[in-house]
């Protein structure tokens, strides 16, 4: 929408603007996670692995289905860009747009990260979040968005004319290339829009432009997810640090992030079954 319009305001403009809103996707029939079962299971966990992601770098990690994983702040306020794939099939990957449409611009406990078409099933369910208290602030910002695409070297070149190789897109591409032992250009094709872990974002009230502000995350904070399928993840410790001022540069103070993998007692998950792929037959009429 143009910032300034030369089109005259129609006489019924107020009436048109007063039309009632309709939520695009009524989710009353959406399959819900059994949070009581998951909360019971998470009380009896054993840590079975961890991966430390260095500042301005990316790393991959694996989570077997039925396990929990936590993204943890360990040294200072730091934002992370998260990609998820089916560990056995990179074509099934996190679908941030549909997750946003089904849940909200920012996700929290009980929300699920959905996979791409034609699979469209929950990949992971958020089970705990130490930043759940934040809610919406006076600027309209929240934490853990599924709006932003990830900082990337192409946009950086477009806006600054220079090259910067530690953008989250590049970090994720290098991490996946190392994990799968493939060329970085091949890996890049699988990198996708992210969940911005710990990032504090919103839209300005006047122009509705995407903004960021300093993340409220502190050492010891974490977000925890339950793996609904076997997952391959990649996490970038964003070069913006807490994203309070800038990204795509070496200016911001940056810190590592840690991914922890936790195993539940199988007896505590006796009532859980992994989700199947979407049942639509792909006939398209």
Image (cartoon, grey):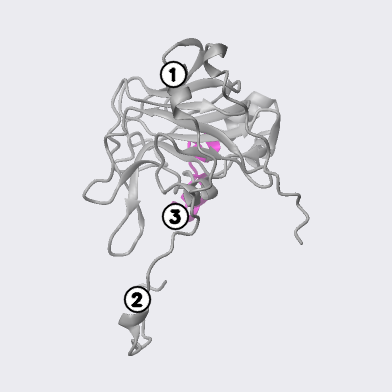
Q: Tell me: residue 19, above or below residue 75.
A: below
Q: Badge 2: how crowded within 10 Å, few (<14), some, or many (20+)?
A: few
Instruction: Locate residue 222, reporting x and y percent.
Output: 37, 25
Q: Give the quadrant of residue 205.
A: bottom left
Placement of the N terminus among the 4 image quadrants:
bottom left
Q: Give the quadrant of residue 54.
A: top left
Front-lying residue, 177 or 196: 196
Give the alpha-carbon distance from disc 3 to disc 2, as whole Å: 35 Å
Left or right of 68 on screen, residue 173: right
Q: Tell me: residue 262, above or below residue 232.
A: above
Which region of the structure is painted magenta?
A: 152-171
Front-lying residue, 89 or 177: 89
Q: Is residue 205 magenta?
A: no
SS category of the residue bearing label 2: helix
Give the alpha-carbon distance from disc 3 to disc 1, as whole Å: 49 Å
Q: Badge 1: how crowded within 10 Å, few (<14), some, or many (20+)?
A: few
Instruction: Locate residue 45, reporting x and y percent.
Output: 46, 12
Q: Give the quadrant of residue 15.
A: bottom left
SS category of the residue bearing label 3: helix
Instruction: Locate residue 6, reporting x and y percent.
Output: 36, 85
Q: Is residue 56 visible?
A: no
Reading the image, the residue beneath label 2 is 17
Q: Main secondary structure of the magenta part?
A: helix
Reading the image, the residue beneath label 3 is 159
Q: Residue at x 44, y 18 (%)?
A: 40
Front-lying residue, 65 or 73: 65
Q: Confirm or deny contact between disc 3 and disc 1 (CB under 8 A).
A: no
Reading the image, the residue beneath label 1 is 40
Q: Earlier in the sequence, mark 2 or mark 1?
A: 2
- Mark 3 or mark 2, whichever is nearer to me: 2
Placement of the C terminus among the 4 image quadrants:
bottom right
């Amino acid at each position: 929408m143009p910032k300034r319009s030369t089109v005259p305001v129609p006489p019924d403009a107020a009436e048109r603007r007063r039309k009632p809103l309709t939520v695009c996707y009524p989710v009353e029939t959406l399959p819900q996670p059994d949070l009581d079962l998951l909360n019971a299971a998470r009380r009896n966990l054993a840590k079975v692995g961890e991966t430390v992601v260095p500042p301005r770098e990316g790393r991959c990690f694996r989570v077997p289905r039925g396990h929990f994983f936590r993204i943890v702040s360990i040294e200072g306020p730091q934002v992370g860009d998260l990609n998820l794939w089916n560990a056995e099939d990179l074509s099934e990957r996190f679908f941030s747009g549909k997750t946003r449409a089904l849940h909200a611009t920012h996700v929290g406990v009980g929300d699920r990260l959905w996979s791409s078409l034609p699979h469209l099933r929950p990949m992971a369910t958020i089970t705990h979040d130490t930043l759940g208290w934040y809610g919406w602030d006076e600027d309209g910002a929240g934490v853990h968005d599924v709006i932003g695409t990830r900082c990337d070297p192409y946009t950086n070149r477009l806006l600054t004319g220079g090259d910067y190789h530690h953008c989250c897109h590049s970090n994720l591409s290098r991490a996946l290339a190392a994990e799968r032992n493939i060329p970085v250009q091949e890996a890049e094709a699988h990198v996708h829009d992210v969940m911005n872990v710990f990032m504090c974002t919103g839209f300005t009230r006047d122009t509705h432009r995407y903004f960021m502000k300093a993340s409220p995350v502190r050492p010891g904070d974490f977000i925890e997810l339950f793996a609904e399928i076997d997952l391959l993840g990649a996490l970038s410790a964003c070069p913006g640090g807490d994203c309070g001022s800038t990204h795509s540069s070496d200016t911001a103070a940056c810190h590592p992030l840690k991914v922890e993998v936790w195993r539940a007692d199988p007896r505590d998950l006796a009532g859980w079954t992994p989700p199947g792929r979407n049942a639509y037959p792909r006939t398209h009429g």
